[in-house]
Amino acid sequence: MAGKIRTLNVDDESHARIRIRQLLKLCADFELIGECANGKDAVECIVGDKPDLVFLDVQMPRLSGLQAVQRIRRRLSQVHCIVLTMHDDPELAAQAFRSGASAYILKSTPASELLQAIRTVLAGEQYPHQVRRPAATPAAVRRIADVCEAESLSSREREVLRLVAGGSTMKQAAAALGITPRTVAFHKYRIMRQLSLHSSAELVQFAVKRRLI
């Protein structure tokens, strides 16, 4: 690739952006052209900045990392997207690649391996981190059953799940659906209780696995 590699750094956590920023300083052929704290801003930035490489977190406000990858690749097909995550999850990794990512890498990955992944991606190849496949424990079996329960969600509950897991606030989801934020919160509570989910992060993971976002 001629010239410096134009790079966009996208993560809602400042310390994560700092780590990538420091990593890129180790290589003279990288140029950091911008940073964003959410997926929506990243999609808007790539139109004018046209980066060669984009680092994205999976879970971000306004637009998830995987949603952002899909939109970025539609607008700039030649860009390489590296998804960084804390989730050692083979299903989420598979979803990342289906979305158009070139690499799925844990945030805990050593800098040396991350640099190797970058070089692999820039050479036109995919770089999947070797995620662990969970054993078939009783907890795993219950999780499979929970996933199947998605079929029992009402159409309104699916709409709420898609919007909230996709990064919309209660107020934004309410405006989109023509209901009150309190009603959105009630639906979210029912969804999480019905699917045995205990946090917003688990809600996002569930929606990604079911391809609802």
Image: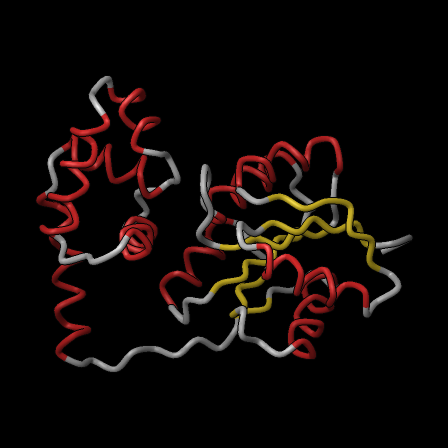
The image shows residue 159 at horizontal and vertical percentages of 24, 32
Question: On the rendered structure, is 150 left or right of 68?
Answer: left
When the figure is inspected, residue 122 is found, relative to residue 149, above or below; the finding is: below
Q: Where is 172 relative to 14, above or below? A: above
> Looking at the image, which residue sits at the far right?
3
Q: Residue reaching furthest top?
A: 178
Q: Is residue 61 above or below residue 175?
A: below
Image coords of residue 142 (percent x, y): 12, 68
The C terminus appears in which quarter of the rendering?
top left
Figure quadrant of the N terminus = bottom right
Q: Residue at x 9, y 50 (%)?
A: 194
Q: Quadrant of residue 86?
A: bottom left
Q: How are the residues colored?
A: secondary structure
Nearer-the-camera pick, 17 or 126: 17
Judge by depth and name the residue closer to the eye, 178 or 128. 178
Image position of 33 with respect to 74: above or below: below
What residue do we see at 82% from left, 53% from top? Answer: 31
Task: Point out residue 133 in the picture as x, y percentages from the top left corner.
Answer: 34, 77
Residue visible at 17% across and 81% down? 137
Estimate the x, y position of residue 192 in percent, counting from the top left. 16, 50
In the figure, is residue 182 to the left or right of 61?
A: left
Q: Name the residue located 54 percent from the left edge and 69 percent from the top edge.
A: 107
Q: Which of the 4 image quarters holds residue 206?
A: bottom left
- In the rendered structure, the answer to whether residue 23 lies left or right of residue 94 reads right
